[in-house]
Amino acid sequence: MRKVLTIAGSDSSGGAGIQADIKTFEALKTYGLSVLTALTAQNTRRVDSILNLPPEFIEAQFNSVLSDIKINAAKTGMLANHDTIKAVVKALLKYQVTNLVIDPVMVSKSGHLLLETKAVETMVDELFPLAVVVTPNIDEAQALAGIKIYDQSTLEQAALLIYRRCAKNVLITGTEVDDDDHITDLFYDGVEYRQYRSVKLKKQGIHGSGCTFSAAIAAYLALDKELPEAIGRAKKYITQVINYSFAVGNGYPVGNHFFQLFRDEELRQTIKEVSDGVYRLKQARMGRLIPEVQSNLVMAFHSAQGLEEVVGIPGRIIKVGDEIEVLRAPCLGGSQHMGKVVLTVMRSFPHWRAAMAIKYNETIIKIADNLNFTIASFDRNKEPLVIQDKEGFSLEWGTREALKSIDSPPDLIYDTGSNGKEPVCRILGENVASVVDKVLKILDLYSE
């Protein structure tokens, strides 16, 4: 097993520091070791007290660990003062530590100063040159570069200035400049800029996100990934850690480092819900509601961000007279079209996670209206050419257009078709059971 060392402070609340690092290492199937630099008395709201460990004890930890165990990567976190940094630099040089990721922890999430001002120069001049990458957040980047970051140009300028100070790869994390819908991390290697982007989550400000991201980069470097790939994989990991975050106190939520365990259970439950929904639809003999293009029944994970987190029916639900059949069992990514509809709706109504396509006609719309469904529609004939030219973007555009006309979650979104496109209704709800209930209510009142 690959081994990764964290050199950082302890967080008594468990959300950041070495606790977050060790959980990240273990989640990514590496073995975590630690050298403590400080003890903190803190919770999810504030840092109450800090006890910096003596440099001699920091060196003793290095000697004990590295004289016995060969590590494959390392990362630094909280290094509060000049003496601590000097002790760490001495040990890193002594043991020729490689694959070093430096998270220049300067201020806590709650605003507490974690690095003495006079120690910044020591960090930049002596520690940064030992790193493979330095990962400041936007506040730390502004302090290190000495400029205010307010757009893409100043972001790139900050990365360049930091690079010039240490001649090392720079990754500025957690920025939202010029784009309120995405979180962008900017990488600069002295030659070119590269962006790592993710959709902005409603859950964003978690305790320990910087620690976790840098620890994940170190873990992937230990697993022999090249730096650009290590960053990309770490970006996906921290996004899901945030996505599955939860509250343990009254302050910032903490990341869920073992989200995969929760994800596996959610997959099992979602597949069961879709399967149960299909069974109910079969029993109801609802084939007469299936459109000519056939149908699908989908449900997304909580906080789903992509089609890989939406369960659907591969090959669609097909009509056989008044009966319906499915050729394959539900699975992730089973329906791109309906999956995009659900994901688009979830951006406005996060709890509205399921959908099914049925045929369109005026009778069905009238029935839905009599059932007091919230109904919205879009006109395919108004679809911009730039959208038409992009494969798979039509339904996403149409759903966004339909949502503009309503303030509450939609029960039904329809379009009346266009040249070569069959008109279709999409029934939506918070889960599969609610969607099937709505479909069966329409079926009970529908006669061709």
Image (cartoon, grey):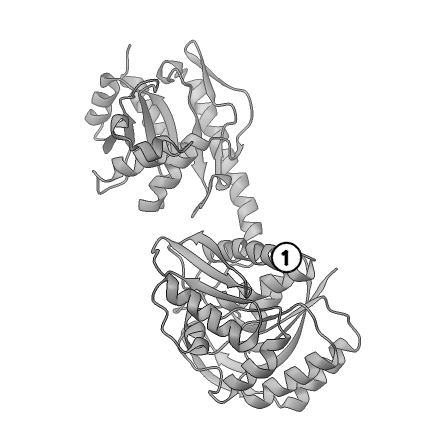
Q: Is residue 30 left or right of residue 161?
A: right
Query: Considering only vertical position in the picture, is 238 above or below 291?
Result: below
Seen from the viewer's position, the closer of residues 356 and 80 is 80
Tell me the quarter of the picture where residue 90 sits.
bottom right
Q: Is residue 353 visible?
A: no
Determine the residue located farthest toward the right in the rendered image: 68
Quadrant the C terminus occupies: top left
Dot 1 alpha-carbon crowd within 10 angstroms: few under 14, some 14 to 19, many 20 or more:
some
Query: Considering only vertical position in the picture, is 282 above or below 321?
Result: below
Q: Is residue 246 left or right of residue 222?
A: left
- Report the residue at 38% width, 67% height from top: 154
Q: Residue 269 at x, y = what percent?
A: 51, 39
Q: Count the numbered circles shown.
A: 1
Q: Which residue is mark 1?
A: 28
Determine the residue located farthest toward the front in the rendered image: 191
- Report the residue at 49% width, 71% height from top: 136
Callout 1: helix, strand or loop? loop
Query: Considering only vertical position in the picture, is 411 above or below 69?
Result: above
- Report the residue at 40% width, 36% height from top: 340
Q: Residue 363 at x, y = what percent?
A: 23, 17
Query: Considering only vertical position in the picture, is 337 above or below 348?
Result: above
Q: Residue 270 at x, y = what percent?
A: 49, 38
Q: Residue 144 at x, y = what percent?
A: 46, 77
Q: Is residue 133 visible?
A: yes
Q: Is residue 366 left or right of residue 131?
A: left
Quadrant the N terminus occupies: bottom right
Q: What amino acid is at disc 1?
A: Leu
Q: Is residue 367 left or right of residue 160?
A: left
- Report the residue at 34% width, 25% height from top: 439
